[in-house]
Image (cartoon, grey):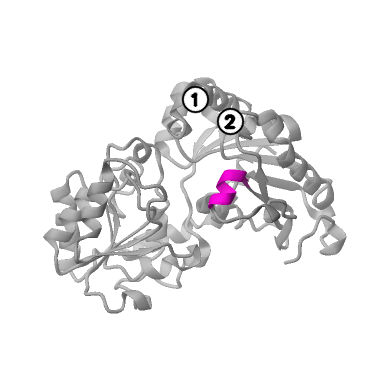
């Protein structure tokens, strides 16, 4: 759709909008998938994608594309990509947030001038943005333990996070573990801290559960079954030794890995990663577009969540693949992650390598069925991104 800064160019009726939802930011697929599914005639949504010059350059975005206009993606949906000087978030946030603030205020003024403004902050640093736009509602949307991202600045990040939680009308945590940690750290705000796991993208939902594997995409068609699949970034959080053991224990199977390879290979884990990829029945396919990953997931005999159970990031996270897998109905086997333990009747959570391999083999021996396909599918259908974002909006004060 064409770029626009004026409501007249789109025929947009601003008088009907009661809530203007500005999301800072939507660089993670899970966040974009969630907020682009806001579907209310009286709610307008702005998806902000913010990055610095260095990241933009590394992603192939050249300087002549660093100043893009806001675009309208749907009836009440806009997106603005902003490229900002390096250091804008951590070193110079008061100054660095100004272009984002101007974008939000301009959008609010032109597209929803009579609506109450709600700011969704996906990093604690965005409290500085709140100081600029002065929203009517403030939502802290916690996706991770951010102190793990920048350990040198952990104390400062926790200070910002405390402020974000105390000042927000509601704090949303996709992980139950983060709910418990924040409630313990900031007990005076515990009633405002809520658990809201990732939803399933509605576009991935079929009209039925896949009791048996679906026909595979073309590049999987010639691989021997069973197809044991993982979709996600190839990184140190995966248990590469476990995947190697699985490939050795089930040489007749094809281990399918869909996701980006390491961007900057470094670390002791790379030897285990390479050893796994060198196995003849391990097949790395590289990155695939978000809109196509359900075609791979539903073709798998077993969907895998082979994360290291003691990795700090894995302890704090809510893996998006839980719902990405469940939306297909296919069987799921996971290592012992806190968030996966919340679904004991829907997926197999294992406590050892031997148990993981045994669970995979048991499902394959049963014809790639575990009798839970319909239950998983119904759970996903009741927890699509559209349902999840509706709950978030309902939790805002009247």
Residue at the location (69% across, 29% down)?
A: 94
Drawn side of residue 152 relative to residue 68, left or right: left
Say if mark 2 contacts mark 1, CB within 8 Å.
yes
Q: Nearer the viewer, residue 251 or 270?
A: 270
Q: Which residue is mark 1?
A: 153
10 Å crowding of disc 2: few (<14), some (14-19), many (20+): some
Q: Is residue 309 left or right of residue 313?
A: left
Q: Residue 303 location in percent, x, y?
A: 30, 60
In this view of the protein, can residue 214 be seen by the observer? no
Q: Secondary structure at mark 2?
A: loop
Please name the residue that numbered disc 2 is placed on: 90
Dot placed on the residue nearer the N-terminal end, 2 or 1: 2
User: Residue 137 location in percent, x, y?
Assistant: 69, 36
- Where is residue 268 shown, x and y percent of the image? 26, 41
Compare residues 264 and 112 and report the one nearer the observer: 264
- Magenta stretch, main secondary structure class: helix
Instruction: Report if residue 340 is visible in the image.
Output: yes
Magenta range: 50-58
Q: Toward which corner of the image does residue 22 lie, by quadrant?
A: top right
Whether the magenta-drawn stretch holds residue 231 is answered as: no
Residue pictured at 50% horizontal, 66% vertical? 291
């Amino acid at each position: 759709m064409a770029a626009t800064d004026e409501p007249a160019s789109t025929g947009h009726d601003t008088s009907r909008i009661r809530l203007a939802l500005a999301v800072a930011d939507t660089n993670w697929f899970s966040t974009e998938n969630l907020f682009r599914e806001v579907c209310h005639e009286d709610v307008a949504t702005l998806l902000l994608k913010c990055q610095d010059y260095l990241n933009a350059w590394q992603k192939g975005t050249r300087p002549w594309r660093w100043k893009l206009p806001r675009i309208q993606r749907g009836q009440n949906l806009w997106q603005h990509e902003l490229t900002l000087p390096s250091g804008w978030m951590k070193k110079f946030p008061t100054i660095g947030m100004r272009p984002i603030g101007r974008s939000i205020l301009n959008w609010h003024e032109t597209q929803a001038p009579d609506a109450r403004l709600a700011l969704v902050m996906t990093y604690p640093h965005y409290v500085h943005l709140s100081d600029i736009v002065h929203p009517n509602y403030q939502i802290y949307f916690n996706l991770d333990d951010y102190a793990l991202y920048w350990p040198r600045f952990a104390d400062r990040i926790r200070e910002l996070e405390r402020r974000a939680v105390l000042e927000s009308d509601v704090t949303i945590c996709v992980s139950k573990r983060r709910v418990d940690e924040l409630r313990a750290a900031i007990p005076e705000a515990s009633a405002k801290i809520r658990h809201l796991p990732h939803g399933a993208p509605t576009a991935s939902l079929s009209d039925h559960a896949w009791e048996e594997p679906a026909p595979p995409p073309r590049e999987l068609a010639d691989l021997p079954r069973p197809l044991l699949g993982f979709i996600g970034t190839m990184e140190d959080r995966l248990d590469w030794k476990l995947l190697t053991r699985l490939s050795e224990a089930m040489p007749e199977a094809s281990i399918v890995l869909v996701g980006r390879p390491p961007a900057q290979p470094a670390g002791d884990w790379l030897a285990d990663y390479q050893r796994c990829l060198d196995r003849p029945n391990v097949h790395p396919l590289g990155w695939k577009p978000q809109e196509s990953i359900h075609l791979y997931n539903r073709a798998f005999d077993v969907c895998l969540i082979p994360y290291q159970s003691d990795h700090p990031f894995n302890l704090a996270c809510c893996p998006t693949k839980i719902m990405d897998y469940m939306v297909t109905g296919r069987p799921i086997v996971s290592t012992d992650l806190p968030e996966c333990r919340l679904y004991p009747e829907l997926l197999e959570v294992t406590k050892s390598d031997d148990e993981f391999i045994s669970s995979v083999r048991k499902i394959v021996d049963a014809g790639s069925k575990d009798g839970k396909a319909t239950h998983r599918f119904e759970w996903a259908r009741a927890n699509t991104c559209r349902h999840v974002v509706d709950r978030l909006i309902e939790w805002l004060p009247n």
